[in-house]
Image (tube, rainbow, N blue to C red):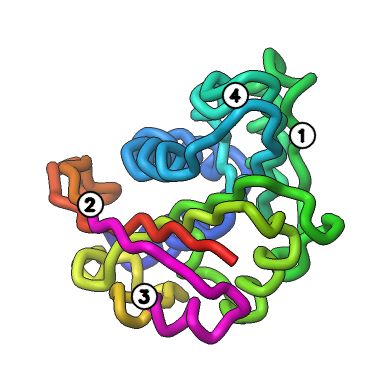
Amino acid sequence: MEKDELRILAENLACPQGEKGIEIGEMMNETNIGMTSESIKALLIEDNEHVLEIGHGNAGHLKTIVSKAKNITYTGIDISETMHFEAKRLNKEWELQADFVLYEGKKLPFQDETFDKIFTVNTVYFWEEPVAFLNEIHRVLKDSGTFVLTFGQREFMEKLPFITFNFTLYNNSEMEELVSESEFKRMKISEKQEDVKSKTTNETIQRIYTVLTIKK
């Protein structure tokens, strides 16, 4: 891919926009489904819980979440207007259980201790003030709640040609240090790997990623 194509891809990975954004949203859902599924599994969702997803994309995985237990309510929040409306369109079947919120990326527009479970996949690279944002997540998570943060490890991500455009990368120790600077107190690291199709070459590559389970 040419430099301009890589820049457009990177911009749409951070915030999908327009028809190209819808296309990339579909691709992200497909290529990230393994990471998303492992994140959902790590949440250990139980009956009557309220789940928040930060950066939901097109939320093609919503059925998996609401079917994990009885009477689950889901809130998805995203900075992309394109993904906000696309997720609503694709998930009309779940509109009584699911709510989608558009926001500016820094302050979570919810009351303290609103959610039982919170998760996010492949968004941490774009957080402008990561410690402050972690503290926002801490604020809206119930005391007994769980936050799962899933990210591609630096070693893997550095091989991708589009990460030169405004991605901040982390290895496990860097992420541990980042979380320790926030108000969160406990975390468990689970390292994973999977074969996925490259976003730029269609070749199969081995992704190394981390599922970080965090508690207050």
SS category of the residue bearing label 2: strand
- Of circles 1 and 4, which is in front? 4
Q: What residue occupies the far front of the structure in this picture?
A: 144
* Residue nearest the viewer, comparing 179 with 156: 179
- Write the residue at 68% across / 59% down: 143
Instruction: Determine whether, in the image, residue 200 is placed left or right of residue 186.
Output: left
Residue 54 x, y percent position in the rendering: 61, 52
SS category of the residue bearing label 3: loop
- Real-space CA distance between mark 3 and mark 4, rounded to the nearest whole angstrom: 31 Å
Instruction: Write down the residue under mark 3.
Output: 169
**Label drawn at residue 192:** 2
Q: Quadrant of the N terminus?
A: bottom left
- Residue type, label 2: Lys
- Write the residue at 53% across / 86% down: 181
- Residue type, label 4: Val
Mark closer to the chain start, 3 or 4: 4
Is residue 188 on the magenta stretch? yes
- Residue type, label 3: Leu
- Of circles 3 and 4, which is in front? 4
- Real-space CA distance between mark 2 and mark 1, rounded to the nearest whole angstrom: 30 Å
Is residue 116 on the magenta stretch? no
Residue 129 x, y percent position in the rendering: 61, 81
Asked if the residues shown at circle 3 and circle 2 are in contact, with their CB atoms under 8 angstroms apart, the answer is no
- Real-space CA distance between mark 3 and mark 2, rounded to the nearest whole angstrom: 17 Å
Residue 89 x, y percent position in the rendering: 69, 24
Q: What residue occupies the far top of the structure in this picture?
A: 93
Instruction: Write down the residue under mark 1.
Output: 99
- Write the residue at 48% across / 38% down: 44
**Label drawn at residue 66:** 4
